[in-house]
Amino acid sequence: MRARSRKGAPGIVEVAKRAGVSPATVSRFFNEPEIVKGKTRNLIEQAARDLGYYRNRIATTDQHGFSGTIGLIVPTIDNAIFAELIQAFSARLLSHDRTMLIAAHGYNPALEVGIVKSLLERRIDGVALIGFEHEKAPIEMLAARRVPVLAAWNYRKDSPIPCIGADNFQVGFEAAQYLRKMGHRDVALVFPPTKANDRAEDRLNGVLHALSMELSELRKNRFFETRYDIGEAKQAIIKLLSEDRPTAIICGNDVIAQGAVYACQSLGIKIPDDVSIIGIGDFRGSSQMEPGLTTVRMPAQRIAEQAADLLCGGLSVTSIKGTTRIKIDSELVVRKSVKDISKVS
């Protein structure tokens, strides 16, 4: 049975007594664990576990201004796009003795004002946003209260706030360049709407740059918009393939690419013999598609872990003007969904 003080729940005095250290040392450990030596830290952690002690975050917030909670605001939690990032971000925060509050705005940045207000009411220690499409109000609210904020998932050298992510322009450029290297000139693009989605916008611009054309130069049946939804993407690509089949399709991410695979299966079209498909993301399951999906890997885990590290101490409130900008390299992952037609006469 776990020991309890006469007042009920155990406190730092009980933990200190069990660990054989002073209450001041226990207090230092829970407020600044990095300054407590390893052996002493282990004794305190074991004593706290034995007694069932946990820190009163509310009291700590009142004394020191830190709640131990970091906010993560994402456009969606409805599919695989941000799943790896959310998981890695949460796990990394736990290693810093922090927890996560997550909210989604459904690709409607106007909702971020209410979300940020709610997070500030909970005395959040920092906030990670996705990309750069944000209204001024929530950023100004965070700045006024000196709460560190950064944009994850996208990188721009002139970002208005600190950022860590892949260069999505380069990601799109890599995908299109690979298709050109494989001999594909008749290429169709299937992307999500770029409004309120700077990641998709940058990728699309990268693709167009590699193809050396403007969006207006694409034939009407060579550019389709669809949400990040497998079923919707499947129907859009069935329409695309039924009208005038290109040799290859660039998908805005692997969710759309999965819809493309299903569309080909429903029409009896072979990948890559009849049409090549390339995605973006390298989400869990992309390597298990038949054939395995060629894609540009978004380094979600590294982005999430470094974002958590920065918000847990490496990001000063003075860097809110955008002085911290970290680019994480993407990676072209070649599998079997793209055919080399460069030598076909």
Image: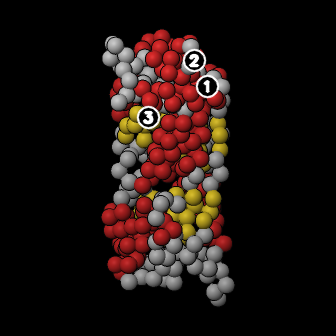
Q: Between disc 1 and disc 2, whose residue precedes?
A: 2
Residue 231 sits in quarter? bottom left
Label 2, label 3: how far apart the Cα atoms are:
31 Å
The numbered mark at residue 21 is 2
Identify which amino acid the numbered label 3 is placed on: Met
Mark 3 or mark 1: name the one nearer the start of the chain.
1
x and y percentages locating residue 91 in the rendered image: 50, 42
**Residue holding disc 3:** 100
Image-based side of 336 in relation to 134, left or right: right
> Looking at this view, is 66 or 155 the one in front?
66
Q: Is residue 1 above or below residue 59?
A: below
State left or right for residue 65 relative to residue 103.
Answer: right
Quick check: 339 left or right of 75?
right
* 10 Å crowding of disc 1: few (<14), some (14-19), many (20+): some
Foreground residue among 96 and 193:
96
How is the protein colored in the picture? secondary structure
Image height check: is 163 above or below 116?
Answer: below
Task: Give how far across and how far down residue 134 sits, in percent.
Answer: 46, 34
Residue drawn at x 54%, y 22% as measured from the top left: 19
Residue 335 found in image quarter: bottom right
Q: Nearer the viewer, mark 2 or mark 3?
A: 2
Residue at 56% over, 54% down: 298
Q: Residues within 10 Å of mark 3 (few under 14, many from 20)?
A: many
Q: Secondary structure at mark 2?
A: loop
Q: Quadrant of the C terminus?
A: bottom right
For marks 2 and 3 on the same chain, the one whose residue lies earlier in the sequence: 2
The secondary element bearing badge 3 is classed as strand
Mark 1 highlights which residue? 40
